Image (spheres, rainbow, N blue to C red):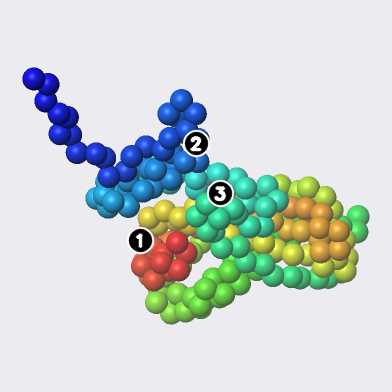
Amino acid sequence: MPTKDTKRPSPCPPPEGDKGEGSFFSRVLWVICCCRMQPDVFVFTLSIVFSAYYAPLRRIEVFLIRHDLKTVPFFFFHMKIHEIKTRVRYQETDQMGIVYYANFFVYFEMGRTEYLRNLGLPYSEMEKEHIYFPVTEAHCRFRSPAHYDDVLIIQTCVSELKHATIEFSYKVIRESDTSLIAEGSTKLACLNANRRPTPMPEKLRKLLQ
C-alpha cells in the first residue's frame, strides 16, 4: 500500500511563473524571504559577500572619484570628498602667464590640511601629540592651464589608508567652466616623536574610514 508523502512543505516555496521558473525579481524576493526566516544563514552569506567584494568595490570607488565623479553611487562605500576654493594670485603665475607647476603641490597641501581640519583633527593638534606626516611620494598630471584670477576648486579625498601610511587624491577644477586643470596624489607616512614609523592614531583612523 503506497504511503503518503509526509515531507514538510518548505516555509518559503519558490515563486511560480512560466514553466515554474518565475521571474528574476520574484526569485530575488524569495531568497530575501528565506534569509529573513533563517537569520543565521543571512548573516553567514552576507559576511562571505562582504569579504569577497569589499576590496574590488573600493578600487572601483577610487576609480570613479578620480574620473570626474564628485559623488559615488549609494551601493558603494561612502568616500568623503572635501572642497576648498582659491583664487590664483599674480605671484603664482610664470612668464607665460599660467600657474607655475610647483604651485599645484601647494594647492594639494591646502586641500589635505583643510580636509583634516574639517574632520576636527587639524595638523596642529596631531603635532602637539608628536605625530607627524611627511610626504613620501607626490604625483601630479596637468590637464589644462590655469591663469591669473581664476577661481580654482580643490577636491581632496583619502584614496588609500594603511597601517602607517595614508594617500590623498586631488583634483583641481576651474570654477568658471568646470575644466579639469590638474589631478594628482600624495602619500604620507606616520612618524612618532623619534621620526620613526608608527601606527596611525586610532582616532584619526576612525575619522578617515
Q: Residue placed at 55% from the left, 44% from the top? A: 60
**Residue drawn 45% across the image and 55% down it:** 161
Q: What label does residue 24 carry, if any?
A: 2
Q: Please tell me which residue is depicted at 57% across the width and 49% down the height of the picture.
A: 62
Residue 18, relative to residue 170: is it above or below?
A: above
Q: Residues within 10 Å of mark 2 (few under 14, many from 20)?
A: few
Q: Nearer the viewer, mark 3 or mark 2?
A: 2
Label 2 near label 3: C-beta < 8 Å? Answer: no
**Helix or strand or loop: what does disc 2 sit on?**
helix
Quarter placement of the C terminus: bottom left
* Residue 99: numbered disc: none
- Report which quarter residue 71 is drawn in: bottom right
Instruction: Locate residue 4, reporting x and y percent.
Output: 15, 29
Q: Which residue is mark 1?
A: 199
> Disc 1, disc 2: CB below 8 Å?
no
Q: Is residue 136 visible?
A: no
Which numbered mark, 1 or 3, is in the foreground of this view? 3
Please name the amino acid that badge 1 sits on. Answer: Pro
Q: Quadrant of residue 21?
A: top left
Q: Earlier in the sequence, mark 1 or mark 2?
A: 2
- Residue at the disc numbered 3: 61
On the image, the x and y values in percent for residue 74 come to 55, 55
For the residue labelled by badge 3, is the local secondary structure a helix, a strand or a loop? helix
Tell me the distance, in whole angstroms, between the alpha carbons under discs 1 and 2: 47 Å
**Image position of 161 (left or right of 80):** left
